[in-house]
Image: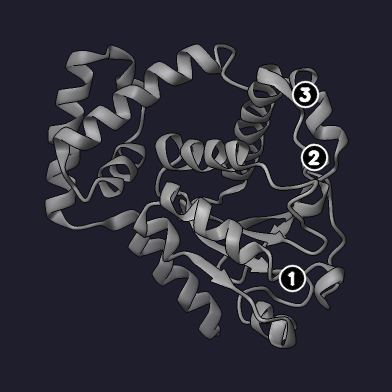
Amino acid sequence: METEKEKQSEEVAMDELDGTEMEKNKVGLMRVRVEAQDPTAKAVDDLMIRRFLRARNLDIEKASTLFLNYLKWKREFVPKGFICESEIEDELAQLKAYLPGHDRLGRPYSVILGRKHIPVTGQEGLEQFKRYMVYCLDKLCAKVPKGHEKYCSITDLQGWGFSNNFDLRGYATAISIMQDYYPERLGKLFLVHVPYVFAAAWKLICPFIDKKTREKVVFVDNKSMRSTLLEHFSEDQLPEIYGGKKQLLPMQDA
């Protein structure tokens, strides 16, 4: 007999994939528009085009501009189609990103340990961080099962501080990559172990985050962390460090 969670998962999948007739019509119109300007758009499926449409509230002109910029960026920034681990060795060595499993809806999720992010100085450091972000996002998206489009993330800010972890340029870059090149992919972002000093940093970061993305951010109270996370992750998929049974698996080993 089908469980309530299975029904919920199916409903989410249908909502992600079906869309409305108006959306379908706009996807067709946008496809004609972008293919005329960039023939490589023919290789992209309708779901990707729809994500860019949704990111711009179904405005075909704005979504087309965003999508064409994405295609150009992809060719220039990821010419091989993927990021080699040899290109991001400094970032991988920090062991700050993990890919443990999936949430109750079957969506893959990452765990990010904020205290382990130590910015690599200089322009090359920033470029490597950009490549690292693309590497991680591609890993996450590759784990998204059929019937879904989104991933989730738990960002752990325990031990985070201005002196060693605050990297406004890096954070703004990460948000820009997520919003401009991977729109409508984030399902939920859970912030745990949030220190008081992060409130000031959040005020600086917020202007870079669009309204839709901000609505997906959940600040988890320390006192109810385990119970809150268990609403979204089964015990066998929740990491041990949050009271579950899952071991953390480094992103590069996933």
CA separation in Å, label 2 and label 1: 18 Å
Q: Position of residue 64 (x, y in %)?
A: 22, 30
- Residue 204 vs 224, above or below: the answer is above
Q: Secondary structure at mark 1?
A: loop
Q: Which residue is mark 1?
A: 193
Q: What amino acid type should be assigned to the residue bearing mark 3?
A: Glu
| For marks 2 and 3 on the same chain, the one whose residue lies earlier in the sequence | 3
Q: Position of residue 73 (x, y in %)?
A: 44, 19
Residue 186 left/right relative to 100: left
Q: Position of residue 56 (x, y in %)?
A: 25, 45
* Pointers 3 and 1 in contact (C-beta within 8 Å): no
| For marks 3 and 1 on the same chain, the one whose residue lies earlier in the sequence | 3
Kindly identify the residue that appears in the image at 85 percent across and 43 percent down.
95
Kindly identify the residue that appears in the image at 27 percent across and 14 percent down.
38
* Pointers 2 and 3 in contact (C-beta within 8 Å): no
Q: Position of residue 3 (x, y in %)?
A: 55, 84
- Mark number for residue 85? 3
Q: What amino acid type should be assigned to the residue bearing mark 1?
A: His
Residue 190 left/right relative to 224: left
Depth check: 232 or 209 in front?
209
- Label 3 Cα crowd, 10 Å radius (few <14 / some 14-19 / many 20+): some
- Residue 20 vs 170, above or below: the answer is below
Q: Secondary structure at mark 3?
A: helix
Q: What amino acid type should be assigned to the residue bearing mark 2?
A: Ile
Q: Which residue is mark 2?
A: 118
Residue 253 left/right relative to 132: right
CA separation in Å, label 3 and label 1: 30 Å
- Label 1 Cα crowd, 10 Å radius (few <14 / some 14-19 / many 20+): some
Q: Secondary structure at mark 2?
A: loop
Foreground disc of the pair 3, 1? 1
